[in-house]
Amino acid sequence: MSPNPAREHPYERVANELRAEILRGGLAPGAKLPSENDLKERFKVSRDTARKGIAQLRMEGLITSHQGKGAFVRERPRVSLRQTGSIYRARRATGEANYNAEAKAQGQVPKQVIREVVETGAPEKVADRFGIEAGAPVVVRRLLFLVDGQPMQLCDSYYERSLAEGTPLAESKLIKGGANGFIENPDGPIGRRIVQFIEDLDIRMPYPHEIEQLDIPAGVPIAKVMRTAYDSAGNALEVLDSIVPCDRHTFRYVIDVP
């Protein structure tokens, strides 16, 4: 309900009451909303006003509309990204890539699709984390992560050329066990243990190409996550630049304070 019902526009009353039903579970994910005619009768408003109320919920990302079928409460698969050292090691022990292992642990079906693997000049923020000049050559692996067939995030993984050159990191194919598993493999060519991740989050509205690639509804922001992996000597091994729709993930961080 509106904090001040006396001041709410009729279409806001429609949106506010339907939103409340959705948030408390009265209208479950996948449920069909009442038709515009039904809402017209229920709220004693015009059909145009009912349509505007539905449009407000669609703009907020709570519902989707299908031509000739009506409006439905959005079904939103979520992956809980739990960031602790012990969880990271537990996921690594499965032999799966970290994201895949986390999704599977939550009963979901993950998939990774390679968009491209190329050598490029390091963007300024990536170069800063590696401690190199902007534009210096790096290898980037651009992937799309899906869960239960739905796009969940765009992930660009950067590596210094001296680390990636001549290894699977520079090849356009998926790496069994994920890139981190390859980097840490004691029998592999790199064999360096990751001891710290630092993440920087920036919340903003998505750009058009992100909306298209991730099928992001109107009104849903994204989290731009920059995660840097360090070894025991303080060297950056990987910079992960991810675009994550905020309605499909929950983040949980555990911070141990000595």
Image (cartoon, rainbow, N blue to C red):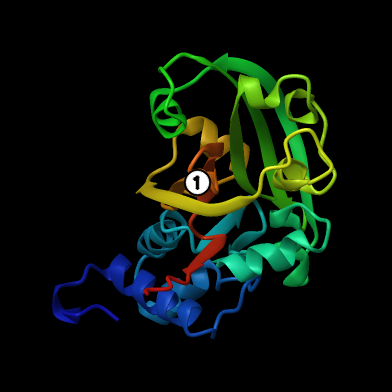
- The residue at 83%/30% (across/down) is 173
Note whether 42 is above or below 99 in the view shown.
below
Please report the residue visible at 75 percent of the width from the left and 56 percent of the height from the top: 100
Q: Position of residue 239 (x, y in %)?
A: 53, 37
Does 238 appear above or below 255? above
- Asked if residue 183 shows in the view, the reply is yes
Q: Is residue 21 above or below residue 205?
A: below
Please tell me whether residue 19 is drawn above or below residue 227 in the rendered image. below
Q: Is residue 215 found left or right of 256 in the rendered image?
A: right
Q: Secondary structure at mark 1?
A: strand
Residue placed most toward the observer, 39 or 212: 212
The residue shown at (48%, 58%) is: 61
Residue with the mark numbered 1: 227
Q: Residue at x 19, y 80 (%)?
A: 3
Residue type pointed to by label 1? Arg
Residue extending farthest front:
233
- How packed mark 1 is, by other alpha carbons closer than 10 Å (few <14, some 14-19, many 20 or more), is some
Q: Quadrant of residue 50?
A: bottom left
Residue 192, given in percent of the width and then of the height, sits at: 67, 43
Residue 220 appears left or right of 164: left
